[in-house]
Amino acid sequence: MVLMALLPTGMMTALAGAPLLLWFLPRLRHLFQPDVNGPQPAPFPARSFTRLPVLALFIVMLIVALAFAHGVNGWRWNSLAEIQVMLPFRLPRLLAAIAAGVLLAAAGVILQRISRNPMASPELLGIGAGASLGITVQLLLWPMAAMPVMIASSAAGALITLGITLWQARHYALNPQRMLLSGLAITALFQSVAAIVISNNGMAAAMLRQLMTGSTYYVSTPIAVIAFTLALLLLALTPLLRRAMLLLSLHPSSLGLNVTQSRLLLMLLAAAMTGVATLIVGPLSFIGLLGPQLARQLGARKPMEQMLFAAVIAAILMMLADWAGSNLLYPRQIPAGLMATLMGGPWLALLLWRPLGSTNS
């Protein structure tokens, strides 16, 4: 009975099943691939793409996040002097939230484009789970380590996960469908290890729960500035691979594109974006899926157009999640990642349901 309490059945199932899936993946001869020969129905109704409302909403959300808050005297707009006093506390969290949203949305666009799967998202790469495992191991070996050691451990876990995924993918020319399955298996494996540690180690449990729910609470100003800079730099690299993103959804081999090399470069870029976002606020769900979907709903079809506006939309969602998490239950804090999932889940379900209704009518 004690062992069952310490090692729940679900966690042990994931520990046993995930390695089996990783072992079977290279031996699968056939895997579903979307048919690109026939006409593909648009996932959302075509409509004119309006840019100004999205940009205006970004500015409005930025102002609200900095100036409107719930304090000891209730809800109120802060004066300019109060904003200046609170800026060192609010701005780092805001920059971290924006950076995480931009990175995850851009990675989501890349994965959806190269896999031709509109439901692909960055967490399926397993990078976030690898980063969590890196911190888990560090907390077990060195529980009182400083923040730089935690960042290094998280980065090491993310890099090891990426290495395992690419090593698995070498057998099938970096097929994105198989890479996502491999990432899913790695995520299940690593998350079960972290869950077992949470169940048995009280000292590590609080930090791991904070990480897994995507909190911006502990983000300092230097980390926020570095994260925001890295987000801009990685986003600036995407135009260099615009042709690959466009052709991989067609017949790339007949258009003179090196498929394996293009997939590798795009996967590395998506993994770097996901890894940096995970280092900032931990593994987040739905943002990397919801941002690209909303951009397509608004009419963005070209790769760079979709990526830029998915990044802006995801930044708005992350600012809203961080602001709501800080103020709705004041003085208690709700992690931004958990808040983003609570807001984004129903919204995504509505978006996916509406086109079905329109096609049946």
Image (cartoon, rainbow, N blue to C red):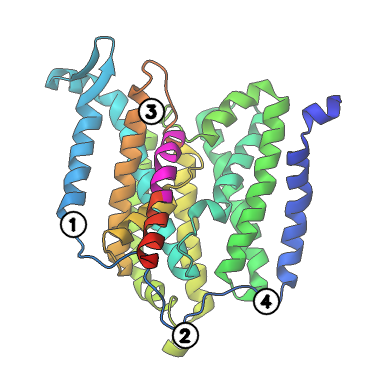
Is the residue marked by circle 4 packed among few (<14), some (14-19), or many (20+) residues within 10 Å?
A: few
Residue 137 shows in the view: no
Tell us which disc is closer to us: 3 or 2: 2
Label 1 neighbour load within 10 Å: few <14, some 14-19, many 20+: few
Residue found at the very far left of the displayed protein = 80
- Of the residues shown, which amino acid type is indicated by label 1? Arg
How far apart in space, not on screen, are marks 2 and 1 (Cα)?
A: 32 Å
| Tag nearer the camera, 2 or 1 | 2
Lower position in the chain sequence, tag 4 or tag 2: 4
Segment tinted magenta in the rendering: 338-349
Q: Which residue is mark 4?
A: 30
Tell me which numbered mark, 4 or 1, is placed earlier along the sequence: 4
Residue tagged by mark 2? Answer: 37
Residue 145: image location, x then y, percent: 59, 27
Seen as rendered, the residue at the extreme top is 73
Whether residue 97 is visible to the viewer of this picture, yes or no, is yes
Q: What's the distance in space between the residues labelled 1 and 3, CA to CA?
A: 28 Å
CA–CA distance in space, label 4 to label 1: 42 Å
How much space separates mark 3 and mark 2, taking CA atoms?
A: 46 Å
Residue drawn 65% across the image and 21% down it: 203
Q: Main secondary structure of the magenta part?
A: helix
Lower position in the chain sequence, tag 3 or tag 2: 2
Name the N-terminal-most of marks 2 and 1. 2
Q: Which residue is mark 3?
A: 325
Q: Is residue 205 magenta?
A: no
Q: Residue furthest right?
A: 1
Q: Nearer the viewer, residue 118 or 46?
A: 46
Q: Nearer the viewer, residue 248 or 45?
A: 45
From the viewer's perspective, is residue 142 above or below residue 104? above
Residue at 47% x, 70% y: name it: 116
